[in-house]
Image (cartoon, helix red, strand yellow):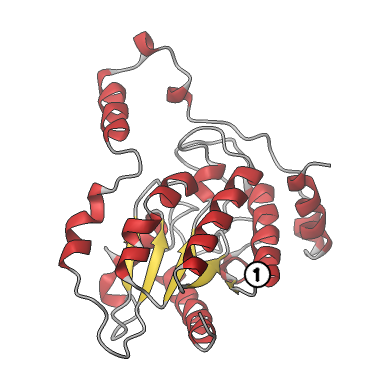
Amino acid sequence: MRRIDLALLAATALLPPTLSTQTAPAPMRVDASLVTPAADLTPAQVASMQKKLADWPQLERYRAANAALPAPAPGEKRVVFYGDSITDAWAGRNSATFFPGKNYIGRGISGQTTPQMLVRFQQDVVALHPAAVVILAGTNDLAGNTGLSTQEMIEDNIRSMADIARANGIRFVVGSVLPVSDYKWRPGLQPAANVRALNVWLKQFSEDRGLVYVDYYSALVNAEGGMREGTSNDGVHPTAMGYGVMMPIAQAGIDKALKRKP
């Protein structure tokens, strides 16, 4: 069996009947614009791709902010939240409620996939000298944002980031992928089973490596494998209520990680 199938079997064995009887993982697809002949692309699509190719991992996004950030104060245990739009919005648009008084640092970028995050991990995490990083990633890979991405590819990228963190004495906190039953920007993928399978691997990987796993998924999922009512307006990104559910889960994971040796 493929790795994703083994993970799914493990996942469905632990799920309530309403979830365990859902369909198997859907075939992964990619953004149609990535396989459309260049002559058929709109000027806006071409411009967007040119911008992405000029800085594919988007290193420019936080370069100035990183340079302006002072070194951690003596005794400070700096924490970086690292991810995609869910992290970006949490620390950006919702900054007033992003762990008040904690001075945690957000380094999320909307739309990013794990290969992009792996490329910028040195600049946007390691160079900030944190005591811990809280990573939330993988849903955009499943959506095919930067091309075909199998679960094995996602696993390799998460594993590589964990290796880099360990080599630099950074505690690695692994967040579960949030529930998704459909992506509005790429409808019809039926990602719920793929999300469950990936979370099974993330949890097992964390246990095998002695990492801290924070389970947002179980607190947010509904019977269809999507987000609970009120926790998201688009089925992917949390509302203030959704972030309110996630915050104590993340904080408990951070507290647990910081008690451990790097």
Which residue is located at x 53 percent, y 51 percent? 138
Residue type, mark 1 in image: Arg
Q: Is residue 227 left or right of residue 14?
A: left
Residue that protrudes farthest toward the top in the picture: 39
Residue 228 at x, y percent in the picture? 56, 64
On screen, residue 102 above or below 173: below
Residue under the image location 60 percent in, 71 percent down: 215
Estimate the x, y position of residue 232 in percent, counting from the top left: 46, 60
Nearer to us in this view, 231 or 10:
10
Instruction: Tell me: 68 left or right of 7.
Output: left
Query: Position of 144 compared to 207: left or right?
Result: left
Q: Is residue 38 visible?
A: yes
Number of marks in the rendered image? 1
User: In which quadrant of the rendered image does the N terminus lie?
Assistant: top right
Q: Is residue 181 visible?
A: no
User: Which picture quadrant has residue 85?
Assistant: bottom left
Q: Is residue 134 above or below residue 109?
A: below
Residue at 36% x, 52% y: name it: 120
Of residues 105 and 193, which is closer to you in this image? 105
In terms of image quadrants, where is residue 18?
Answer: bottom right
Given residues 47 and 53, the one toward you in this image is 53
Percent x, y of residue 106? 32, 66
Residue identifier under label 1: 209
Instruction: Give how far across and how far down residue 172 sits, in percent.
Output: 51, 70
Residue situated in front as seen by the camera: 100 or 104: 104
Q: Helix, strand or loop at disc 1?
A: helix
Category of crowding for the residue at label 1, using alpha-carbon neighbours closer than 10 angstroms: few (below 14), some (14–19), many (at least 20): few
Q: With respect to residue 179, does 185 lie above or below? A: above
